[in-house]
Amino acid sequence: MAHEKITEAVRRLGVRFPIIQGPFGGGLSTARLAAAVSNLGGLGSYGAHSLAPSDLGPLVNEIRSLTPHPFAVNLWVSDHDQGGLELNEAEFDRVFKIFEPYYREFGIQRPEHPAHFHHSFEEQFEALIEANPPVFSFVFGVPRPAILAECRRRGIVTIGTATSIAEARMLDEAGVDLIVATGFEAGGHRTSFLKPAEDSLMGTFVLTQLVSDRVKTPVIAAGGIADARGLRAALSLGAQMVQIGTAFLACEESGTTPEHRAMLFSDKAEQTTLTRSFTGRLARGISNRWTEDMIARSKELPPFPIQSWFMSYLKSAMIKTGRTDVLPLYGGQIAPNLRHRTAPALMESILERL
Ligand SMILES: Cc1cc2nc3c(=O)[nH]c(=O)nc-3n(C[C@H](O)[C@H](O)[C@H](O)COP(=O)(O)O)c2cc1C
C-alpha cells in the first residue's frame, strides 16, 4: 500500500504502519482497544502498572485471543517516589484530612490503612515475562540489565521512554530496542526519571529532533499528535513512528467513562494543566474543580503512589455517579482538535492522508 512507511522501528515491531496506540495506566486501557489497533496494522498497547502481578498472564492471553498481531504491555519501572512506600498513622490522618471533605460529599468511608499502596515492579515484571508479550514498553526509568537481557533472550521488543536528552542517552546505552521521546504536550504523566519532571519540560518538536540526532536507537515521537499532519511532521523531525494517546483515549474502545470522553470533545479541553494532584506525579489533564482546589494545597499532597491510592476512592465514586468534577480528566493539549470516536475511524483518517 502506498501509505505503508517501512522504517527500522516498524520492522523491529513487525507492524504495518508507524502508529502506536499509547498505553493508558490506571484502568483506562482495554484489551479491546489494544487488539483493535494491532488488527488495524498499528501497535496496540495496554498500560498495566496498576494491575496485580497475577492479573498480567490472563491479560496477555486475553489480548492474544483478540489479535494475532504484535501488541505492547506497559509497566512503570519506578513504583514509588521518595516517602511513597509507607505512611505512619499520624501522616495517614494528615493526608486523609485533605480528602475528607470530598469523601464525605460522595459518601465514602475512611479507608483502612493498606499494607502497600502499589504493586512492586519487580513482581509485575516476573509475571509479565512468563506471559511472554511481543512488546514490553516502560516508563519512569530503565530496568536492570538482567531484565533487558531476558527480554532480548526471549525476543520481546523493548520500548523505553525519555523526556530529556540525558534520559534518551541512558536508554540508548542500556540497549533498548526503541525510544519514545515524549513532549510535555502529552496527556497523562511526565515520565521523567533523572531530574524532577518540572525540570524536564520539553516539547515534542524540539525533543524529537534533539534525541533523534543523538541516539542510535530508533525514536518514536509522542505528545500532541492526533492526525496525519502530526505524524508527517514527527517523521520529518527524525522520528520513525509516533505514539498517540489522547486521540485513542477519546475513542469508545478505551476504558474511560462516557463523561470523560465528552469532556475531551468539549470546549473545556482547551484548558489542560500539569498537576501532581491526580497521583503525586506530574500529569496533564483537563482543569476541573479538583485541579483548581488542589493548587492551593499542592505542598501538602503526599508522594506517588500514596496520593494515587487516596484518589482511587474518589475515582470510583465519580465513575459510579457519572460526575467529572473531582475525576482526573487526563488529556493532552491536542484534545481540542479531536474528531474521531472509534479506533478504526481514527486509524483510517490518519492512513488515508499519510
Ligand atoms: C490517560 C493516560 C494514561 C497514560 N498512561 C500511560 C502509562 O501508563 N504508560 C505510558 O507509557 N504512557 C502513558 N500515557 C502516555 C500515552 O501512552 C502517550 O504517550 C501520550 O498520551 C501521547 O501524547 P498525546 O496524549 O498528546 O497523544 C498515558 C496517557 C494518557 C492520556
Image: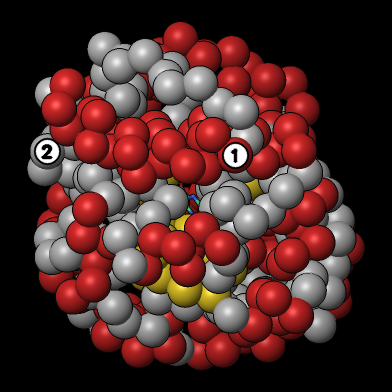
Residue sitting at 18 percent across and 43 percent down? 81
With 158 as the anchor, is 2 left or right in this view? right
Give the residue type that dot 1 points to.
Glu
Res 246 → quadrant:
bottom right
Residue sitting at 56 percent across and 63 percent down? 289
Q: Give SS at disc 1.
A: helix
- Residue in the foreground of this view, choosing between 280 and 149: 280
With 55 as the anchor, is 76 left or right in this view? left
- Give the residue pinned by disc 1: 105
Residue sitting at 33 percent across and 38 percent down? 97
Q: Is residue 42 above or below residue 270?
A: above
Residue sitting at 73 percent across and 48 percent down? 323
- Residue in the foreground of this view, choosing between 83 and 215: 83
On the rendered image, what quadrant is the N terminus found in? bottom right
Res 59 → quadrant:
top right
Q: Give SS at disc 2.
A: loop
**Label 2 packing within 10 angstroms: few (<14), some (14-19), many (20+):** few
Q: Position of residue 138 (x, y in %)?
A: 36, 45
- Give the residue pinned by disc 2: 83
Q: Which mark is residue 178?
A: none
Q: Position of residue 118 (x, y in %)?
A: 33, 26
Q: Is residue 81 visible?
A: yes
Q: Position of residue 306 (x, y in %)?
A: 29, 35
On the rendered image, what quadrant is the C terminus found in? bottom right
Q: Is residue 20 visible?
A: no
Q: Position of residue 95 (x, y in %)?
A: 28, 38
Q: Earlier in the sequence, mark 1 or mark 2?
A: 2
Give the residue type that dot 2 points to.
Gly
**Label 1 packing within 10 angstroms: few (<14), some (14-19), many (20+):** few
Q: Is residue 245 above or below residue 353?
A: above
Q: Residues at badges 1 and 2 in contact (C-beta under 8 Å)?
A: no
